[in-house]
Image: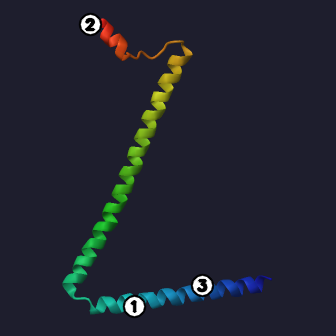
Amino acid sequence: MKSTSKQYLYSVFRQSWQELSSVGRKVGLALQRTPLPRLLILCIGLALLLTILPLVLTLFVAFMLVKLFFLLVAMNLRSDSDQHGQAIPVETTRSYYDKK
């Protein structure tokens, strides 16, 4: 039983390696045919993408954590006021016009 699973894994890895190496060869040939200025622009674009993408993801996670923190604080304040029997003061439009 073990030998068949090993043979299967070996064939899967061998086929994956063949596919990756063929893609690598095609990319290498395409890069050799590409003019140097275009290749430079591609490298700069790739470098910018690799530096900006983690920054964007980090800022997104940071703002989501800040939002979650403020939500938890607001829920905690509301539950504390409910436990003490105090209502959160909210003025309605009727009471606003009654004051005038």
Q: Which residue is mark 1?
A: 26
Marks 3/1: CA–CA distance:
20 Å
Q: Are marks 3 and 2 in contact (CB under 8 Å)?
A: no
Indicate which disc residue 1 carries: none
Nearer the N terminus, badge 3 or badge 1? 3
Name the residue nearer the viewer: 87 or 31: 87
For image coordinates 69% across by 85% down, the residue present is 8
Marks 3/2: CA–CA distance:
81 Å
Total count of labels = 3
| Element class at badge 2 | loop
Q: Which residue is mark 2?
A: 100
What residue type is disc 2 on?
Lys
Residue 5 on image: x %, y %: 73, 82
Q: Residues within 10 Å of mark 1 (few under 14, many from 20)?
A: few
Q: Which residue is mark 3?
A: 13
Q: Is residue 84 left or right of residue 43?
A: right
Nearer the N terminus, badge 3 or badge 2? 3
Q: Residues within 10 Å of mark 2 (few under 14, many from 20)?
A: few
Q: Is residue 75 left or right of residue 46?
A: right
Indicate the quadrant containing the C terminus: top left, top right, bottom left or bottom right: top left
Q: Is residue 98 above or below residue 11?
A: above
Nearer the N terminus, badge 1 or badge 2? 1
What residue type is disc 1 on?
Lys
